[in-house]
Image: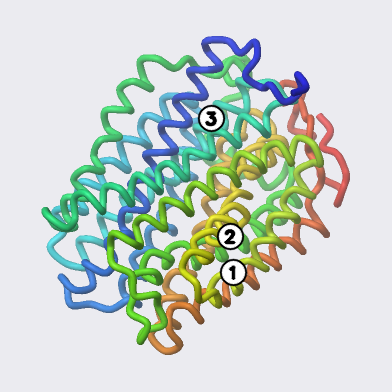
Amino acid sequence: MRDGTRWYRGATRNQWRAFSAAYLGWMLDIMDLMIFSMVIGHIVTDFGTDRGTTGLIASFTLVASAFGGLVFGFLADRIGRTKSMVASVLCYAVGTLLCGFAGGIGTLMLARIVVGLGVGGEWGAGTALVTETWPAKHRGKVVAWVQSAFAVGYALAAVITLLVVPSLGWRWAFFVGVLPAFAALWIRRATQESEVWLNAKTRLSAGQSIKRLFSVNPKAVVVCLAFTAAAMFGYWGLFTWIPNYLASPAAEGGRGMGILSSTTWIIVMQVGAAAGFISFGYVADKLGRRWAFVLYFVAAALCVPVFTLIGNETLMLVFGAVMALFGTGFYSGFGPTLAELFPTEIRAFAQGFIYNTGRATSAIAPAVVGLLSTRFGVGMALTGTAAFYVLAALIVLLFLPETKGQELHTMSSSSTVDGPGSRVTG
């Protein structure tokens, strides 16, 4: 293997701790976020509601994540990446605990909003910490490995549901979700602050951060918001309902699997997702960010309708892993690309704002798929999400600049984006 791919060679203790903190925070972030998707069916039964309403709760969670990205992103640029990350982890852990005590749809929605705030904040702070700590030539690969924690967190949510829900009920799945609070203590003690952030001379107010974001690189903001929203609409519309699709009876357009079988399939799909996250980083560092995005978006769009048409369960299991590889792997590209487009003084704010606003814009996806599933069945509703992967590919191909290899410490507020294939200059 060429040395260029051995990103872990020569890494310092501080780099490994930054990596570990971001990995742990993201893994537990997704675990807490996806527990809800695993127990939707139980909530519908317990509260006497319908899929459209529970899909709306998922949508509100994503909207809250956009606000969380703003708040914690600003804090990460103001008080430091590590402190902001710790606060966000505590926020989503407490929110998950409150979900277990919810007495109805209204209180559950409020608790999920708290979860969304923390979930939105963790990604921006953690990604900024990693991208500023590791060298540019390995940035795509390192962030890809951090992003693979998504699959581990998703699988943990499935395992928790399998082990806890049948005997103790769905509320206990949320009670287990308070564990990230303990991880926050380790992150606070063990992780050093980013030297890039410490050496930055500018500390902006909230108003200044917003103004700087839209004045430094307005085209980049619009382009990134557009393609992240399109891609995330495809993802959240598809994967929020995959557990329910597998478990729903055939009469409702599902596959009629029990909780054990559907959980097994979800775990296998997350193995595919992990492979996607990691492979995307290597592809992005080799071919560039743009072509990696286009490749994965197009492949995901092709996989979705095929997945819903497969009749053989074994073949469906194998192909599900392939769909997860392309349908989620592109997430590894957001961190490096956004970090390379914006200067240090607004980097975490820009990452948190764009990533989570894109996610919030896609918030209607779970509700739309939920409503469509009541009329056309879950499988047919899922098929429509492929169109949004295609839209994301077109936006990237036509408008996103190439940022591969950008040295973050050289970036200034004069960074600009001129068009597809152009380079960001600092």
Q: Position of residue 94 (x, y in %)?
A: 24, 42
Q: Residue 330, relative to residue 278: is it above or below? A: below
The residue to which callout 2 is attached is 323
Q: Residues within 10 Å of mark 3 (few under 14, many from 20)?
A: many
| Quadrant for the C terminus in the image | top right
Mark 1 or mark 3, which is nearer to you? 1
159 relative position to 369: left or right: left
The one nearer the camera, 181 or 382, is 382
Image height check: is 323 above or below 367? above
Residue occupying image coordinates x 56% and y 35%: 348
- Three-letter residue code for mark 2: Met
Q: Residue at x 79, y 41 (%)?
A: 288
Q: CA distance from mark 1 to mark 3?
A: 38 Å
Q: In the image, what residue type sits under mark 3?
A: Asp
Mark 1 lies on residue: 304
Q: Is residue 241 above or below residue 187?
A: below
Quadrant location, the N terminus: top right
Please say if 347 is above or below 331.
above
Q: Are marks 2 and 3 in contact (CB under 8 Å)?
A: no
Residue at x-position 50% and y-position 33%? 125
Q: Which of the 4 image quarters holds residue 46?
A: bottom left
Left or right: 219 as drawn, with respect to 90: right
The secondary structure type at the circle numbered 1 is helix
Q: Secondary structure at mark 2?
A: helix
Q: Which residue is mark 3?
A: 77
